[in-house]
Amino acid sequence: MKHKTIIEPFRIKSVEPLSLSTESERKEYLKKAHYNLFLLRSEEVIIDFLTDSGTSAMSADQWAGIMLGDESYAGSRSWLKMERTIKDLTGFDHILPTHQGRAAERIIYGYLGGKGKTFISNTHFDTTRANIEFSGADAIDIPIPESADTSLIHPFKGNMDVNRLEKLIAETGAENIGAVILTVTNNSGGGQPVSMRNTKAVSAICKKYGILMLLDCCRIAENSYFVKHREPEYANKSYKEIAQEMFRLCDGAAMSSKKDALVNMGGFLALRDKKIAEACTSLLIITEGFVTYGGLSGRDMEALAIGLEEVFDDHYLEYRIKSTTYLGEHLHKLGVPVLMPIGGHAVYVDAKKFYDHIPVDEYPAQALACDLYILGGIRTVEIGSVMFGKYDENGKLIPAPQELVRLAIPRRVYTQSHLEFVIETFEELIKHRHDTKGYKIVEEPQFLRHFTAKFEGI
Ligand SMILES: *Cc1c(COP(=O)(O)O)cnc(C)c1O
C-alpha cells in the first residue's frame, strides 16, 4: 500500500519539554521585550519558528560523533573528516572552517570588498549585505521580476535576473564587481529555489566577464530537492549529484552549517583559487583560529561532517520539504496570503495583504509577528521594513519591497501536531485581523536593527 501520510522518518529518543504559557502571561512577556521577539527568552515561547538556523535536532550518529571529536589544536582527525566531506561535496581545494556563516562572509567580503566595489546577488541575506556594506562596498539585489508577486506560481522564484546582470556589468564595469553571489535557496527572497539552468546562465556570464561567482550554499540540499523535482533533466540524479554540479559552476562557496549541515554551530568557506584562499587564510588565523579548526571545536567538526551527509538522504529531504509544504498549503486554504509556491525551510506570510489596513511605515509584518506570539506563543520573524528599511535624508522611511513574516521550521524538531497547533492559531487570528494596529520604532542601532530595536504600539 502507498500511504498518503508522510511520516517523520525518525523516532524520538530524547525529549525537550516545551514551556507552555497563557495569553495574558505572553502579553506581559512581549511588553517587557519591547515588542521585539528577538528580546524574548526562549522559555517564553511555545513553538519557536524564529529561525531554522542552529536549531536542528542532531541524530544519534551525530551525538556519537560528538564523543569521538578530536580536540587537537593542529591536524585534528575531526577536521580531516570535515575537510574531506566538504571537498567531496563542493569539489573545491581550499576549505576554511569558521564558527558560523557570517564569519566566512566577513573574511571573503572583507578581502574582496572595499569602497568602489559592487556585489550582485539574487538576494543578499541580511548578514551578507551587512558584511559587504561594512567593507564600504555596495550590494545590489536582482531577483527575477516574478519574485515580487507573492501569489504567482513559478518553479524557481529564487532565480537571478540574468538580463539585469548583463546590464549591471556593463554599467558598473566588470573590474569593479567584487563577486556575483547566488543564494540557494533564496532565504530573504522567500526560501525559493534557484534552478540549475539559471545557475548555468549566471556562471556563463561570470566566465565571459571574468567575474568571481560564489554560492551562498546554506540550503544547498533543500535547493537540490527542488531541482530534482522541477527540472526534468535532473529527475534521475541524486540530490548530492545535483549539489555537486551546482558547485562545479561556481568559484567558491560560503556556508552557514547551522542550516543544511544539521548542526547547532558551524560554517565554512570553500574556494577554488589558491591566491584568494591564501589571503583569506591569513584573515582566518587572525580572527577565527588556526586552519584546522577555525572557530570550531573538534566535536563540532565531527558532527558537521556527519550532518552534511545525512541531509542528502532521500527520506529526510522528502519529509523536510513536504512538511513545510503541509503547513503552507493549509494556511493558503484558510485564506492566509502566503508566498507561493511554498519554499523549502519556511512559510512566508505577506503581511501587507494580511493586514492591508496597516501602512508600511507602521510595520504590518511586525504587528503580525507580535499577534502570532500573543495568540499561540509562536515566535516568527519580520522580514520587511524593520529588517531592510532605510531612511531618506529627511528621516522618512524607504520601505523594503515586501512586508513578510517568516515561519522558519527547525529541522527534525517539530511534529505534525505542532504544525496543526500553528494552523489553529491562524484560524483564530484571521477572524480578528482588522482589529490589529501597527508599531513604531522608539530605539534602534545603526546596523542590523531588527535584532535590538525597541517598539511601541500605535
Ligand atoms: C544564515 C545565513 C547566513 C549567515 O549565517 P550565520 O551562521 O547566521 O552567521 C548567510 N546567508 C544565508 C542565506 C543564511 O541563511
Image (cartoon, helix red, strand yellow):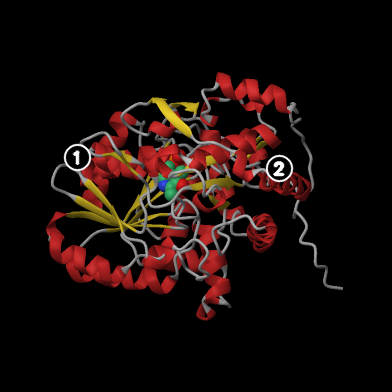
Q: Which of marks 1 and 2 is nearer the N terminus?
A: 2
Residue 364: x %, y % from top left: 50, 42
Q: Is mark 2 within 8 Å of ligand 1?
A: no
Task: Decide if residue 65 is on the left or right side of residue 357.
Answer: right
Neighbor class of circle 2 (other Cα within 10 Å; few <14, some 14-19, many 20+) is few
What is the three-letter code of the residue carrying label 2? Ala
In percent of the image, x 20 and y 63: which residue is there?
168
In which quadrant of this rendering is ligand 1 seen?
A: top left
Which sits in the foreground, 448 or 413? 448
Image quadrant in which you'd find residue 57 = top right
Is residue 77 visible in this depiction of the protein? Answer: no
Task: Decide if residue 61 is on the left or right side of residue 294.
Answer: right
The residue to which callout 1 is attached is 136
The residue to which callout 2 is attached is 60
Label 1 sits on a secondary structure element that is loop
Q: Up-down: is 136 above or below 190?
A: above
Task: Decide if residue 230 is on the left or right side of residue 397.
Answer: right
Which sits in the foreground, 347 or 103? 347
Which sits in the foreground, 167 or 289? 167
- Image mark for residue 296: none
Residue 31: x %, y % from top left: 57, 21
How far is mark 1 from mark 2, CA to CA? 44 Å
Which corner quadrant holds the N terminus? Answer: bottom right
Residue 452: x %, y % from top left: 43, 26
In percent of the image, x 25 and y 66: which residue is there?
165
